[in-house]
Amino acid sequence: MGVREAWSSHETWVFECRNCSTYWKEELEVRHCGDGHGNAAVIYERGGHPCMTPWLDRSCPRCQSQNVKALSATRGEKEEIPKARGGEDVAMVFHLRRVHAW
Ligand SMILES: [Zn+2]
């Protein structure tokens, strides 16, 4: 049984609109794939669909400006985020999405 270098993690991204200073937060599913030669590919998924890297296709939910700064809140962490602790955050993000009708 071979070892496949593929795993998933959650990343929380914080976005800031440079135009109106709105902050918001999104959680993305990140699929990491290694080819066994030290190369790695990362695929971001949002709502089960692959999406562009989070810092490329965002626009402000308030003013629609695309002058948005993205900050990864979890990038660089070696350990996976405990799923049990993320439940409330996910619910909150889902609520925010409904509020903004994303
Ligand atoms: Zn804005």
Image (spheres, helix red, strand yellow):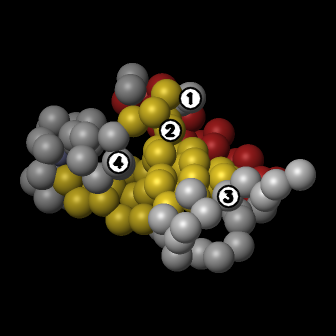
Identify the residue shown where x is 39% and y is 23%.
Answer: 101
Q: Is residue 71 above or below residue 63?
A: below
Q: Which residue is mark 3?
A: 5
Q: Which residue is mark 4?
A: 53
* Whole-percent x, y for residue 41 in the image: 47, 55
The answer to which of marks 1 and 3 sits earlier in the sequence is 3
Q: Secondary structure at mark 1?
A: loop
Of the pair 37 and 33, the residue shown nearer to us = 37
The answer to which of marks 4 and 1 sits earlier in the sequence is 1
In this rendering, would 33 be left or right of 83? Answer: left
**Answer yes or no: do the residues labelled 1 and 3 have beta carbons within 8 Å?**
no
Residue 1 visible here? yes
In this rendering, would 70 be left or right of 75? Answer: left
The answer to which of marks 4 and 3 sits earlier in the sequence is 3
Q: Which circle, 4 or 3, is nearer the viewer?
A: 3
Work out how far the residue at label 4 is from the one at label 1, CA to CA, in angstroms.
14 Å
* Amino acid type, callout 1: Gly
Q: Which residue is mark 2?
A: 45
Specify the quadrant that holds the C terminus: top left
Q: Few, some or many C-alpha atoms within 10 Å of disc 1 (few <14, some 14-19, many ≥20)?
A: few
Q: Which circle, 3 or 2, is nearer the viewer?
A: 3
The answer to which of marks 4 and 2 sits earlier in the sequence is 2
Q: Secondary structure at mark 3?
A: loop
Work out how far the residue at label 4 is from the one at label 2, CA to CA, in angstroms.
9 Å
Q: Which residue is mark 1?
A: 48
**Answer yes or no: do the residues labelled 3 and 2 have beta carbons within 8 Å?**
no
